[in-house]
Image: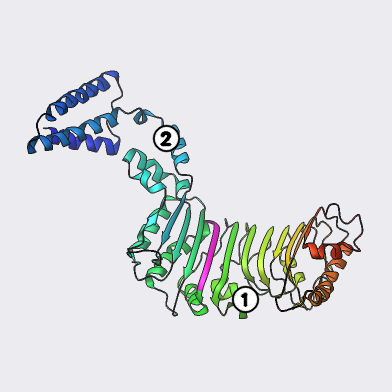
Amino acid sequence: MLEEDLSQLIARCRQNSDIPISPSERSHLQTRVEDHQRELGECDKDIGQLTTTRRAQLTRAIDCQSSLLSPIRRLPMEIMFMIFNAAVQDRTIYFSDDQTQAQTPTAPKLRGTIFPLTWVCAWWRNPLIADGSFWYSYRIHLNDSDFISNNQSFFVTACLSRAFRCTLSIHLALLTHDDYFSPAHSSILEVILVISDRWDSFTIKLDGSLGDMRQVRSRCVLASAVPYLQYVDVDFGEVDGINDLDDCWDAVFGTSFAECPRLDTLHTTHLGPHDTVDLSRLTQLVTNTYDGTITSLLKRCPALRTLTVRNPDFATYDPDPEITDLLLHTNLEQILMSVWDDAEANGTWEFVRFPNLKSLAIVSIRLEDEPRNEAHATLGSSLGEFKSMLMHSKCILRAVHIDDDLKEWFLDGLSTDLINRA
């Protein structure tokens, strides 16, 4: 009889069904708990096999009955969600097939703080699955491992479906080797890319050959537009041959980012003048290199407010012969850039003006084999051109950060009303 009651109790706990609410129901269940506790005390006096089994059943029954009487069973769902939100601080779901750190290679699994909560009972599981805010963020690491299977795409798909119509945050690390891209990887990528029209944030790190990346482009096509995308971070750093291209975005992504009406922030290691990525509403740009002129870049970014260039080897001429007039960029407020010690004046800043520039940071990158005094001679020529642009812009800088050994030289000659605070 107890075995049958026990199976029913377990089902009630898991499904959160038939919870005792009225005083009479709770009193009746409490009486059963006390009866089982007395019987459990009697079992302790006998160590027979049958009694041992009975003891385990009684212990389990008491646990289930006490759980049904627990105050948390009567909490309103609004309070439960406050508890869930506190418990799931990190809402990112992780998936990695990287076995380099594993002592015993195993099939990759999805990991996340949300999963244990869905295993407690149906009362917790159902509302958590129905709330897309717990399923919108993903960090996926694909390393071309032999341990990945096609079934993994099913689990990723199931989790993504729980986000419903919430916008998604996707962080993807893609490492391929020997010009081979597995079908299992393709299936997971297709699951992610087919819903790119719901991306809010997209981060990708690429490592492999350019041929591998072109396989990604041929097999996995983004949606025709990404209307909700606001943040993009693309690292081409480890792709062989990427530095030889002036349209690396197109080589890997095609024209998938040609329509991004909400793109606000872009971080990328490479950006070329011929890349068809929508920069029209960009307010923050961070790039290691840009293979065109500063004029052509800023014409593509009329709303830009912050520009960070870590290796500003801008072209000395503009590929567009029609760009000959001064470009007055009134939105740019902050410039952060690195300058090589051997940088020479090349007319980079001749055709731009920033009347509303407020903050400036310049870092000099020293070439180890170049004497400091000789480096300063060429660097001075380059920064002199930049200083001239600042003075012609008639901006008022409120913050200037520059290497100590360059600061005195750089500020020398600038009018006092140009520098509010250095």
Q: Residues within 10 Å of mark 1 (few under 14, many from 20)?
A: some
Res 247 label: 1
Position of the N terminus, as image quadrant, is: top left
Residue at (37, 69) in percent of width and height:
184
Indicate the quadrant where residue 357 lies: bottom right
Please indicate whether residue 35 sits to the left or right of residue 154 in the image. left
Residue at (66, 66) in percent of width and height:
287
Q: Which residue is mark 2?
A: 80
Residue at (36, 46) in percent of width and height:
116
SS for tag 2?
A: helix
How far from the left and from the top, in percent, is residue 323?
A: 80, 74
Q: CA distance from mark 2 to mark 1?
A: 51 Å
Indicate the quadrant where residue 414 lies: bottom right
Taking 71 as reference, is 226 above or below it?
A: below
Q: Amino acid at mark 1?
A: Asp
Q: Out of 154 and 238, give the one closest to the viewer.
A: 238
Taking 1 as reference, is 294 above or below it?
A: below
Which range of residues does the magenta coloring cover? 199-207
Q: Is residue 404 visible?
A: yes
How far from the left and from the top, in percent, is residue 420?
A: 86, 52
Please indicate whether residue 390 sits to the left or right of residue 295 in the image. right
Numbered disc in front, either 2 or 1:
2
Q: Out of 337 and 393, give the one closest to the viewer.
A: 337
Position of the C terminus, as image quadrant, is: bottom right
Q: Is residue 282 visible?
A: no
Q: Amino acid at mark 2?
A: Met
Taking 19 as reference, is 397 above or below it?
A: below
